[in-house]
Amino acid sequence: MLWSVNPETTNWLGFSLFYLALFLSLAGTAAIIGFLVRFIFLKRQLAFRAVKIAFRQSFIFAFLITTSLVLLAYDLFTWLNLVLLVVGLSALEYFLISHGSFGIQPPASEAEEKETNIYG
């Protein structure tokens, strides 16, 4: 992609494909690195939960980098835009964490199950 697209002669489709390829490659690389870090160093989680968290955070990271480069290409990259972007993505991550990460709630402990079980 880097050697086949000439930025001086391409149209919006070439730029779109370049930024899409960049986004997907950043997301995939960050997800693999994030999963390995969680799986090797933080052995408190099951593997599928570590994968889910790694993919979520890698997509947010890839969106931050790709959006920053798009803003830089159109001469709209300022510190204020960067701070607003980081604050917005941080709020999104906080929202996803607080709502049980895509609707999957952590399992209840045995004590909570006994308290809520009316037959036991």
Image (cartoon, rainbow, N blue to C red):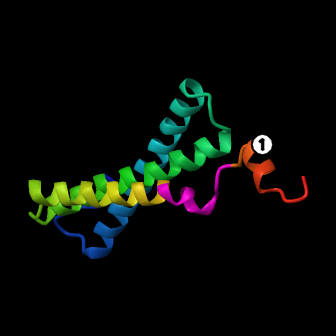
Q: Is residue 120 magenta?
A: no
Please state the horizontal and vertical placement of residue 57, each as a whole percent of the image.
Answer: 44, 49
Q: Residue at x 44, y 56 (%)?
A: 24
**Around disc 1, counting alpha carbons within 10 Å, would you say few (fewer than 14), some (14 to 19), or many (20 or more)?**
few
- The answer to which image quadrant residue 30 occupies is top left
Q: Residue at x 33, y 61 (%)?
A: 19
User: Which residue position holds label 1?
Assistant: 110
Is 87 on the left-hand or right-hand side of 81? right
Is 63 on the left-hand or right-hand side of 67? right
Please state the horizontal and vertical placement of residue 89, each as a whole percent of the image.
Answer: 33, 58
| The N terminus lies in quadrant | bottom left
- Magenta extent: 98-106
Task: Work out whether 14 lies above or below 61.
Answer: below
Please state the horizontal and vertical placement of residue 69, each as a whole percent of the image.
Answer: 22, 56
Please state the horizontal and vertical placement of residue 70, each as a whole percent of the image.
Answer: 22, 62
Give the structural element (helix, strand or loop) at label 1.
Answer: helix
- The answer to which image quadrant residue 73 occupies is bottom left
Is 12 on the left-hand or right-hand side of 43? left
**Residue 59 visible within the image:** yes
Task: Work out whether 18 lies above or below 26.
Answer: below
Task: Work out whether 105 lies above or below 50.
Answer: below
**Residue 4 visible within the image:** no
Judged from this view, the residue extending furthest toward the bottom is 12
